[in-house]
DNA sequence: GTCGCCCGTTCAGGCCACTGTCAGGTAACG
DNA sequence: CGTTACCTGACAGTGGCCTGAACGGGCGAC
């Protein structure tokens, strides 16, 4: 499952990210509404964890705007406000659940798992790119109906491309997906993984843009 | 929004292209299924306007092939056939809407706008100069709807022109874009790249100002 | 522990598109 | 007309890219 975490407190954000990550979900963590809006434009999430007090506005604004566009992504609100009025307001605005800080990480896991269960029950929101079919939640991939196995690093790279078909990703962006932010990599690791992905996904699945980066081909290979 | 127009009739094609263009969308116009397939391969569209009777095949073939690959791009069919059977066949094949020729351009605008409302925006702003269309973020360029590939050096030069369309750039300024600041260049490299750009962008895309420099032509070529 | 396996990373060799140069031709200007 | 500036096809060198192969570490099986 793919989760968007909107939380400006660094310590809590890290803790939540790591927990969800350990539970086997893909987490994108942003620290402001501005970035959150960009993220939902470019990626489809199965769940959004939303803090209310953010540097550039109130979470409710984001929530309402999202619902106004018809987006029905489940949203769990994370906030210090435990007043009943806020809770009602949140649920009215379209939130699906509510977690009051400080909360236990295991409780968070449970709520997320509940969403995941509901989500699994629904018809699969499979992403299809050309002859590939991707289940982001289960980390499963098939090509022309044949299952394809990817290693962890290969997934990390591949997910980057899936954010938006056809998007150009620079070498640096791809490295950021594989390693800690800002990590410098000497060798041609990216090239090697591109090569391995091509071997598994089809030779033309990934297009080289010389001296720029790579982009995922959004049609048949 | 980025629109692919597949229409072989020149007059109608121009009219539709201009209308959509005026509505603020980026239009790629192709006149055959063959070119349409190429375009779809290299670009992600938010909407496809599809004529049915085309020189190299029937629009339904393209439509079905596209849907078979999992591509869910909204498609509006434009055709003279107003029979109910065709309409049903089109919608069954995966079309989203249907416009019967001759149609009013304002009706077309309205249908396109409806798709635009549904669509969640492409974060990359498109720059349009004459018949050129540039996606600076993704380093993509098309001319009259045909994708154009530029090398790294060519991009560097081209970007220089784009920053101030119509302004005169001296040879020295252009050299600064290609090389380290202040680097002296002996040969006529700039001229060569101007020539290469003209070959790709159109002979009149770049205007020579004798003994002064060059400027980008900001209207059609 | 120790063996075997798989994954991540690095390296080296080869390929080919891009680059920069030049030379001969063309257009502008007096 | 001559002179100057510019255009462009051709070409060799090079650097970016691809990929098979090998190394080493982590982890599970036993």
Image (cartoon, coloured by chain):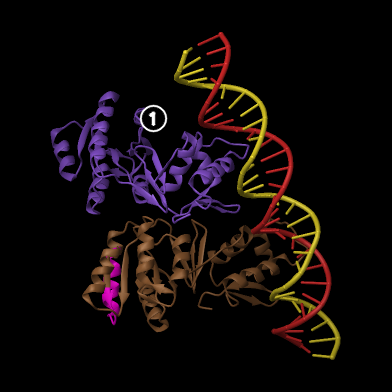
Chain colours: A purple, B brown, C red, D yellow
Query: Who is closer to the viewer here, A154 or A182?
Result: A154
Residue A135 shows up from this direction: yes
Tell me the subunit letter for badge 1: A
Image location of residue A192, percent across then percent down:
58, 41
The local secondary structure at tag 1 comes to helix
Query: In this picture, is B10 found above or below B20?
Result: below
Left or right, A27 with reference to B163: left
Q: Residue at x 13, y 37 (%)?
A: A85
Position of B9 relative to A161 (above/below): below
Image position of A92 with respect to B100: above or below: above
For the magenta stretch, what is the residue range?
Answer: B99-115
Q: Does B128 sit left or right of A31 as displayed?
A: right
User: Of A40 and A205, which appears nearest the observer?
Assistant: A205
The reply to whether residue B180 is visible in this rendering is no
Q: Quadrant of residue A118?
A: top left
Residue marked by disc 1: A14
In the image, taking residue A211 as reference, residue B86 lies left or right, namely left
Q: Which residue is painted at 23% across and 69% down in the image?
A: B88
Residue A125 in percent (x, y) is at: 30, 46
């Amino acid at each position: 499952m793919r989760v968007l975490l909107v939380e400006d407190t660094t310590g809590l954000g890290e803790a939540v990210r790591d927990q969800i990550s350990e539970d086997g979900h893909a987490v994108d963590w942003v620290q402001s509404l501005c970035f959150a809006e960009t993220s939902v434009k470019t990626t489809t999430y199965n769940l959004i964890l939303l803090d209310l007090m953010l540097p550039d506005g109130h979470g409710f604004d984001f929530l309402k705007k999202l619902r106004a566009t018809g987006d029905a992504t489940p949203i769990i609100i994370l906030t210090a406000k435990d007043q009943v009025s806020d809770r009602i307001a949140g649920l009215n605005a379209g939130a699906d659940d509510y977690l009051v800080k400080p909360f236990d990480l295991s409780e968070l896991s449970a709520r997320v798992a509940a969403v995941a269960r509901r989500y699994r029950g629904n018809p699969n929101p499979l992403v299809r790119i050309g002859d590939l079919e991707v289940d982001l939640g289960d980390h499963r991939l098939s090509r022309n109906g044949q299952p394809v196995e990817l290693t962890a690093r290969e997934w990390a790279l591949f997910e980057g491309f899936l954010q938006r078909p056809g998007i150009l990703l620079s070498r640096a962006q791809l490295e950021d997906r594989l390693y800690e932010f800002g990590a410098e990599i000497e060798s041609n690791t990216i090239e090697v993984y591109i090569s391995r992905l091509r071997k598994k996904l089809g030779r033309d699945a990934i297009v080289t843009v010389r001296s720029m980066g790579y982009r995922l081909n959004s049609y048949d290979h």
